[in-house]
Amino acid sequence: MAILITGASGFLGANLAHNLSPTCSIIGTYRNKRPTIPGIKWGSMDLTCRDSVRQVIVNCNPTAVVHCAAQANTERAQSHPDEAIRINRDGTRNLVESLPNECYLIHVSTEHVYDASKSWFLETDTPGPVNEYGRTKLLAEQEVRHFEGDWIILRMALLYGGRKEYRLCFCDCIYSQMKQGIHARLFMDEFRTPLHVSDVAIAVQAAIERHPTREIFNLGGPDRLSRAEFGWILAEETGLDPNLIEPISIDSSPTIAPRPRDLSLNSGKIRSCLGIRPLSVREGIRRAYSCSPT
Ligand SMILES: NC(=O)c1ccc[n+]([C@@H]2O[C@H](COP(=O)([O-])OP(=O)(O)OC[C@H]3O[C@@H](n4cnc5c(N)ncnc54)[C@H](OP(=O)(O)O)[C@@H]3O)[C@@H](O)[C@H]2O)c1
């Protein structure tokens, strides 16, 4: 089985490629710099160029595609909305239009499609993104729904963990700051259900085996936490000084993109449909730092 992972040079794509490569034949795409991941084949692809997307699909004829590539930077998407539309919406359209109907499409979406008006969002809640990133990712979902073959959409929570030789995540930045004795200013009023990146590979593998179709799934961890609470668990589990965590309010640190306060996901549907059990934050941090990064 050949699985194409778009955006395999990014944080999620690289970790997925790494974790799936022992059991599947993986082709990864990159746009700028090709990373080194043992055992995977590569294709260069620019999502905004239909010919480039078609060429990769024709060359590798995948059984399944995990579409990770995106403009995933919230601040950049807010300040460059036209670029975000081109990559996230139009790029997804280019992919959908290039895929043969026999291919299974697993589309990676985000918690940011929700409107932050409550806690523990369900897939049946009406989306209402509050920033350009969420808006363009919701438009991408609408492109996926036009695909005539089988598809699922995974609306993922904030990700952490992963291998340190690939792109790092927010948690690694906090860790390395604290390790140097630098205070980490973390929001105490921004709530998420963080997901260890290895759980994405488990969910993708289960989806490929069980093949649900035309379904949207939330995919988050079991704990609803603020960033500051996440930081305190990180400190506790890694033996760093918890006093280095400085809890602050979202209001005290303005950003270009509106920051939704609560995007916690209820992931009961995917847990029962695919039989997966994502790690708690404490378990995930233990796994992420069993070999401490430098
Ligand atoms: N990280 C999270 O916490 C999180 C949470 C929820 C959902 N997600 C979703 O997960 C996916 C991956 O996110 P990430 O954090 O791994 O992002 P990332 O590290 O920024 O990686 C983005 C990937 O997309 C590729 N890309 C960007 N523009 C492209 C273009 N025009 N054509 C082709 N490839 C392009 C990048 O390639 P180059 O680097 O080679 O340019 C890179 O491989 C996204 O769909 C995001 O919405 C992420």
Image (cartoon, rainbow, N blue to C red):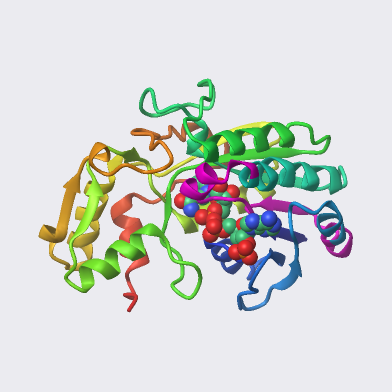
Q: Which residue is drawn at 32% across and 56% down?
A: 283
- Indicate whether residue 63 is drawn in magenta: yes
Residue visible at 69% across and 45% down?
86
Percent of width and height locating residue 212: 68, 37
Position of residue 210 relative to residue 28, above or below, is above
Q: In which quarter of the image is residue 16?
A: bottom right
Residue at the far left in the pictured view: 243
Residue 107, x across and y down, in percent: 66, 44
**How many numbered dots are placed on residues in this image?**
0
Q: Residue at x 88, y 47 (%)?
A: 100
Q: If the image is split into quadrants, where does the C terminus sit?
A: bottom left
Closest to the observer, 132 or 82: 82
Magenta-drawn segment:
56-82
Q: Is residue 48 above or below residue 90?
A: below
Question: Residue 79: where, in percent of width, then height?
Answer: 51, 45
Q: Taking the image as four quarters, which one is ligand 1 found in? A: bottom right
Q: In which quarter of the image is residue 32?
A: bottom right
Residue 167's x, y, as percent? Answer: 49, 67
Pick whichever, 223 or 127, lies toward us. 127
